[in-house]
Every structure is written in structure tokens, then in C-alpha cells.
Amino acid sequence: MSDKINYTKKDLINQISSQIDIPKDKIKLILDLVIDNMKQIFIKNQSHTRLEIRNFGVFEIKKTKAKPKARNPRTNEVFFVPNRRKISFKAGKKIKEILSKEWNE
């Protein structure tokens, strides 16, 4: 079993900083602004929201149906799950092409 590689926002800031000559604190500020603006787009009380970032992918808010008889598999307790919204991501064409190639680890 392989170990997962976990990247953080700090890793992203360090990577960007190594590519361009901008101080890390300014990169952090810009990244925080981008993330905050994306968050604001998604938390608006709209039924259908879509954020497209060309050459990367599409983030989309989708509705889920209510589940009147959901079950906890550990306790077998039955409970009601209301309908809600969730974010789905669909990779862009270039990323999808790269990911669809055979993978040998």
C-alpha cells in the first residue's frame, strides 16, 4: 500500500515563490484572496453555481436529494438526511488527458 502525499497551502506558496520573484507573504495574501473569493461564490444562496477556470476545471454546486432512511453502518441507526448542496469538480481537458494515461508507480 502506498502512502498518500499531502500538500498544504504552505507547500503551494513555497512552490509559487520558487517560480517567481515575489515574497511569500504577498503570495499568501493573493492565494488567500483567491480562496476567499471562491468561497464567497459558493456560499451564495443560489440553487446552481458554476465556477470555470480555463485549463484547470469546473467547480459546480449540485443539489443532493433528501434521504429519509439513511443508515449508520456501525450502529444500524436509521435517520433522516435533508437535501443539501455540495461542490463537485470536473477536471479540464488538459488535466483529464494527463490523468487518463497509464500510471505505473
Image: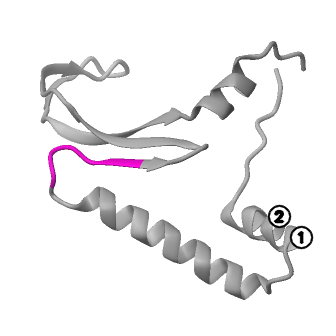
Q: Position of residue 39 (x, y in %)?
A: 38, 63
Q: Residue at x 14, y 35 (%)?
A: 83
Q: In the picture shown, does residue 19 fall above or below 76?
A: below
Question: Magenta includes 48?
Answer: yes
> Around disc 2, counting alpha carbons within 10 Å, would you say few (fewer than 14), some (14 to 19), or many (20 or more)?
few
Q: Position of residue 53 (x, y in %)?
A: 51, 50
Quadrant location of residue 29?
Answer: bottom right
Q: Are marks 2 and 1 in contact (CB under 8 Å)?
A: yes
Question: Magenta includes 76?
Answer: no
Outermost residue, top side: 102
Amino acid of disc 2 = Gln
> Around disc 1, counting alpha carbons within 10 Å, would you say few (fewer than 14), some (14 to 19), or many (20 or more)?
few
| Closer to the camera in the image, 3 or 13 | 13
Q: In the picture shown, does residue 38 fall above or below 76?
A: below
Where does label 1 land, which residue?
A: 18
Q: Which residues are magenta?
A: 46-51
| Closer to the camera in the image, 49 or 85 | 49
Task: Specify the principal SS of the magenta part.
Answer: loop
Q: Residue at x 26, y 60 (%)?
A: 43
Where does label 2 land, which residue?
A: 15
Q: Residue at x 60, y 78 (%)?
A: 30
